[in-house]
Image (cartoon, rainbow, N blue to C red):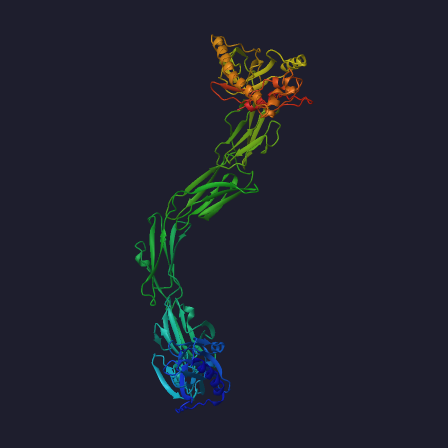
Amino acid sequence: MSAQLLGLAFLYLPCSLVTFTTHALQINHTGEVVYHDTNVYGVVDKAVILECGTKEPDLYIWSFTKPGTDAIKAVVYNLGKGPKIQNLAETLGQPTVISNSAAVSIENLPLAAHGLFTCQAFYDIEKEPVVYYYYVHLIVQVPISKPNLLVRDASPVEGSTIWMHCSVENGTGPIQYMWQYDTSSGNITTFAQSNSSNITITNINRNHRGWYRCVASNFINSESSDWSWLDIIYGPDVPQIDVTPNSITERGYSALETETVSLLCQAQSSPVSQYVWFYNNSQVYTGPQLTVTNVLRMQTGDYTCLAQNVQLNTRSRKTISLTVYYPPDGSPSCSVEPALNHTSLRLLCSWPGGFPAASLRWTDEHIIAGQQTNPLTSTAIWLPSGGLIPNNSLFTCLGLHPALKQPTECSTRAYIPPADPVCFAYVTNNKEYLMLSCSWDGGAPKALVWWEGPGGQSKGGEENSNILILRYGTVRNGKPYTCYAKHPLLVQTKACRLTLEAPVLLTQRRVVSVYEGSDVQLTCNLRANYLPANEITWFNNQGIDVRDTSKYMLLQTSAWANLTVRDTDETQDSGEYRCSTSNAVGGAEINITLVVKKHPMPPNATLVRVTYNSRQRNEVELEWQVELEEDGGWTGFFIEHRWLSERGGRRGKNSNDSREKTEERASQDWFSNIIQDPDVRSHTVRGLTPTFTYEFRIRPVNHRTIGHPSAAKIPVELRNNVYPAVIGAAIGGMIFAAIPTFLLIVYIIRNRNNNPRLHDKLFSSQHSQSRENINFSEDDIVSSDEGMGNTGRSSSPGPSTSVPQLPSSLAYTSQSTSPITHNQTLPTSDDNESMSDTISVKRTKVIHALTP
């Protein structure tokens, strides 16, 4: 029966392409196809279900016909093996078959799914198959999109006509439009409804100003546009000016000086008016409010506010008059002046200007009642002094003005300058003039100051200070110059005096003696003189002006100058040195004798003990004594050594030549080490070669002189009873070491086949010969001595292995200091080359190194 149904499915599919209709059709006679016709409404991007009967058919086929075409195309079918969705379904949304039915659910319904869906359903009945055709007309509806409000001329001029258009991009009709208005108070009102998207407003005025929007709706949804601002252009009206503080007069407005006056201009206009303020026809400010802080008298006049609408290019104006009442400028001015040649006082008080004029009066107990003045803008009073007015008296003048809430006053004080007159002198930079200055600062009124000097060198009176100018060099030495000062509150006259003198130089020592090589400082001081002196100048023993060099160092101030002579030399630096200076009155100089002495010869030293301190012969202890120790005169010691020969000589064909070269070297080279402590009397020399014989000597040294060397001595052996024990211990150790050596040799001989290389090295023919294993030529010997930063080189023959070489240096130790050592290294040489280095100490540089 399924096969029969399958055949019917393909039989009826092409037939339906030409016989479908949009009207419901049902044929109930036996063997005929049954037709059902329905309409289904869907919304874009929503879900919709297309029904195919109430019962799940055995077989079914869904197809789609696009409006305007006759083609029918399969979307999904089920021939008994489950639903199969066709590629066409991708353009119709996301169709899925609902389980246990032939109904199709479409998600995210697209607009392309609008059309005729046909479902062919086949049912297997006992007698014969039954076929149903379900015509589903899917009507896809589009919801209204957000409308857009378009306003022709969003800023119309008052009295004109405008129209508004509500534009909807998507939406299934019919569409209804509603127009709404939002007033400034926040109330939303609907002023028009229509099925048209356009509306016209005539004779518009400023009351229409506000927010507008349109609302579009269909049977699916309703959407509102954004609010759009409608600005009505009008104005400006005649401005209104508000004045603060509001003081009205016959001429307009008035204000008191120093008040803050605010002028606010307002004119109805859209857009908002721009305001320009004019003062007496001159533009002074832009903005609605003109604020004059601390208004002044010169700001009296006419103020005009000009309001203008820049969009309409219209304007209006209004003018007011402002009068400023003011007191005189500032406050009363008071002063006290001298009168009658600084014997009396005169009080002055004035306060000019203002409207009306201010009145003035003195309010002091020292003013005689009969001398009180009438109110005037200025007044002056003369007061006799003669010592009757106390020092630091205060005089007050009171000023009154109707524009001021409080009276204004000024005060002046008469007082004597503090301290006493001050006199001093100074010289101009070019040394052309000498200035004598006298001042008596302070006081009211200022004191009268004048100069009187010898020979008519005087100057008349001036207030507060006075300067007497004299040509350089014309000052009278030792003669006084007197400055006089007079004040009205004093009966007596004050004075100060200057006595000008030539400079005087001093020194700590007129004769200075030092040892050669040291630095010495010569001093030159200027005795306190009132008149300042010029810079102190030094001259050396050759009479040459001294400047800072590597030889001389100058350190000076205005009162002293020190000369340092570096690294003194007896012949070059001994002699007379001179310092000199001068001032406007005269000059002065002083001589200082410098005596440079050579250092004395240090005393002689003698070695009293030179002994090996062990049987190994690698350390020697030295002791010495110094003649005339109480005199001192030395700074350290040179400990010198050299090697004489090797103990037992050398074997080989060149042993005689080597011995001769060794003796020659011993006769030439002494190796030195420094001990910088003059109190040391013993030393230990370490790191000696036991097979060599040495001799030692000692030299005392001071800063610049090396003393005579002592007699050379050879170290003597250590004498005690431990020698047999040492020999016995050495023999026992040799026997103990020989046993494992013998066992090792036996092992190598028995295993020579396993270790042929080791056997050949021990028992090869080239090593079996009876001769010495000498690595270097007997004629080559190298010795070096490095110390104190100086190296000398000389060569002498001899075996390099026979040189008395220390590990790194001959190590000297003392009881009180760590000496400077000379590093000694003996480089090797090849059999075909002979070289030797000998270092000789340059004793002059070593002596300099010892200098403190």
- The number of numbered badges drawn on the structure is 0
Q: Quadrant of the N terminus?
A: bottom left
- Tell me residue 729's x, y (percent): 48, 12
Quadrant of residue 172 within the rendered picture: bottom left
Q: Could you tell me if residue 210 is visible in this image?
A: no
- Tell me residue 244's x, y (percent): 35, 72
Q: Could you tell me if residue 138 is visible in this image?
A: yes
Decide if residue 564 is on the left or right side of residue 364: right
Decide if residue 386 is on the left or right side of residue 506: left
State whether residue 577 is above or below residue 690.
below
- Tell me residue 771's x, y (percent): 64, 15
* Front in this rendered view, residue 519 or 766: 766
* Front in this rendered view, residue 634 or 393: 634
- Tell me residue 9's x, y (percent): 46, 83
State whether residue 48 is above or below residue 380.
below
Measuring 43% from the left and 69% from the top, which residue is drawn there?
298
Quadrant of residue 804 within the rendered picture: top right
